[in-house]
Structure formats: structure tokens, C-alpha cells
Image (tube, grey):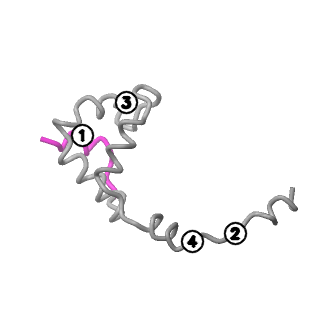
Amino acid sequence: MSRVLDSINKSISLGMVEFLESPFTSKKIKVVLIQMGGIKAATPNGFHAIFYQKYRRIVGGNFFCIFLEILNEGLSIPLADVVTDIK
């Protein structure tokens, strides 16, 4: 096993670094949201992904702004507050 692992290139390219360090975008969140299994697992607030998939046009703007702040800025708020605060 160690021979196999030793033969793997352990460095990453500059392009990979730039990709990994790039900020999340609402486009990336939309792609992931669409690809998620609709009723696979509920979020901490009890909502399944299908809720966000179906109603993203209604809650989308605020929803994506909040999640971009969480992912890019480290904002930490309970997910239940995200849904109840969206108007």
C-alpha cells in the first residue's frame, strides 16, 4: 500500500489552488442544490432539500446571500433562523 501511495504526485497545480481558494458563488450553491437528493436527509431545521429546490425562487435572494456569508465569511447562525427570517 505504501508503494502505491508513494507513487502518487503529492503536489497540486496553481490552477487547483486558485479553484480551491476561490469564494463560493450563488451559481455554485444553485448547482449543488439542484444535484442534492430531495428527501435524502433533513437539515437541522427539519426541512429537506426539496423545500429549497421547490421554493428557491421565493426565498432565493436572501437564501443565497445568507449561505454565501456562511461559506465565505464564516457567519454562524442556526439554520432554523435562516428560514424563519426570510420574508
Spot occupied by residue 82 in the image (x, y as percentages of width and height): 25, 45
Q: CA distance from mark 2 to mark 1?
A: 42 Å
Where is mark 4, residue-wise?
13
**Tag 1 residue:** 83
Residue at the (23%, 46%) spot, across then down: 63
Secondary structure type for disc 4 = loop
Q: Disc 1 and disc 4: Cα gap in Å?
A: 39 Å
Q: Look at the image and give the residue range highlighted in magenta.
A: 76-87
* Residue 71 at x, y percent in the picture: 36, 58
Residue 73 location, quadrant: bottom left
Among the two numbered marks 3 and 2 on one chain, the one whose residue lies closer to the N terminus = 2
- Label 1, label 3: how many angstroms apart (C-alpha)? 12 Å
Question: SS for tag 1?
Answer: helix
Residue 10, label in figure: 2
Q: For numbered disc 3, what is the local secondary structure? A: loop
- Find the residue positioned furthest to the top: 39
Q: Amino acid at mark 1?
A: Val
- The amino acid type of the residue labelled 2 equals Lys
Q: How much space separates mark 4 and mark 3, taking CA atoms? A: 37 Å
Circle 1: is it few (<14), some (14-19), or many (20+) Cα within 10 Å? some
Return the residue found at the far left: 87
Asked whether, in this view, residue 26 is left or right of residue 37, the answer is left
What is the CA distance from the residue labelled 4 to the residue labelled 2? 10 Å
Label located before the other in sequence (4 or 3): 4
